[in-house]
Image (cartoon, rainbow, N blue to C red):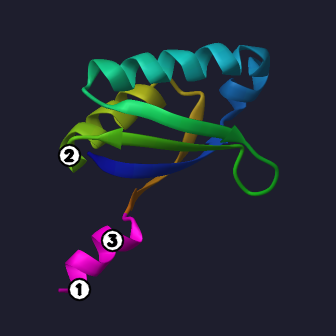
């Protein structure tokens, strides 16, 4: 499975219901599973981003679909990066 790193910021809507954020994260994990992926870890952070999520999905298309299903609820916005391990990157260089 491919690894994806999402850097997320709360929207105004998300901030207004900040106490519900842990439940929303659990709901996102369920959406990821329904798409054939998994939430590997998540951190609430200080700085430019409010949440960093690491997930795995079988393809870029599935990852995009799952992330769109999650962010369309309007509580977060951000960007998702495809992550490669050092071994995967070495293989790409070969």
What secondary structure prevails in the magenta region?
A: helix
Residue on which disc 2 sits: 59
Q: Which residue is at the front of the view, 54 or 46?
A: 54
Q: Which residue is at the front of the view, 48 or 53?
A: 53
Residue on which disc 1 sits: 93
Residue on which disc 3 sits: 87
Answer with mark 3 or mark 2, whichever residue precedes in sequence.
2
Categorize mark 2 by other alpha carbons within 10 Å: few (<14), some (14-19), many (20+): some
Q: Residue at coordinates 76% horizontally, 28% vertically from top-left?
A: 15
Q: Quadrant of the N terminus?
A: top left
Q: Nearer the viewer, mark 3 or mark 1?
A: 3
User: What secondary structure is marked by label 3?
Assistant: helix
Q: Is residue 81 magenta?
A: no
Q: Nearer the viewer, mark 3 or mark 2?
A: 3
Where in the figure is residue 10, as x and y percent of width and height?
68, 37
Answer with mark 1 or mark 2, whichever residue precedes in sequence.
2
Q: Is residue 88 magenta?
A: yes
Q: Residue at coordinates 26% horizontally, 25% vertically from top-left?
A: 35
Give the alpha-carbon distance from disc 3 to disc 1, as whole Å.
10 Å
Q: Which residues are magenta?
A: 84-94
Q: Which of the numbered marks, if any, corresponds to residue 15?
A: none
Where in the figure is residue 33, as x and y percent of width and height?
34, 21
Give the alpha-carbon distance from disc 1 to disc 2, as whole Å.
20 Å
Categorize mark 3 by other alpha carbons within 10 Å: few (<14), some (14-19), many (20+): few
């Amino acid at each position: 499975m491919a690894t994806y790193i999402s850097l997320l910021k709360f929207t105004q809507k998300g901030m207004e219901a900040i106490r519900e954020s842990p439940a929303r994260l659990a709901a996102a994990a369920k959406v990821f599973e329904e798409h054939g992926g998994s939430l590997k870890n998540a951190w609430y952070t200080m700085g430019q981003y409010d949440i960093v999520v690491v997930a795995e999905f079988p393809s870029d298309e599935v990852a995009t679909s799952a992330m769109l299903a999650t962010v369309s609820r309007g509580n977060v916005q951000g960007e998702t990066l495809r992550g490669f391990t050092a071994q995967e990157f070495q293989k790409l260089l070969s």
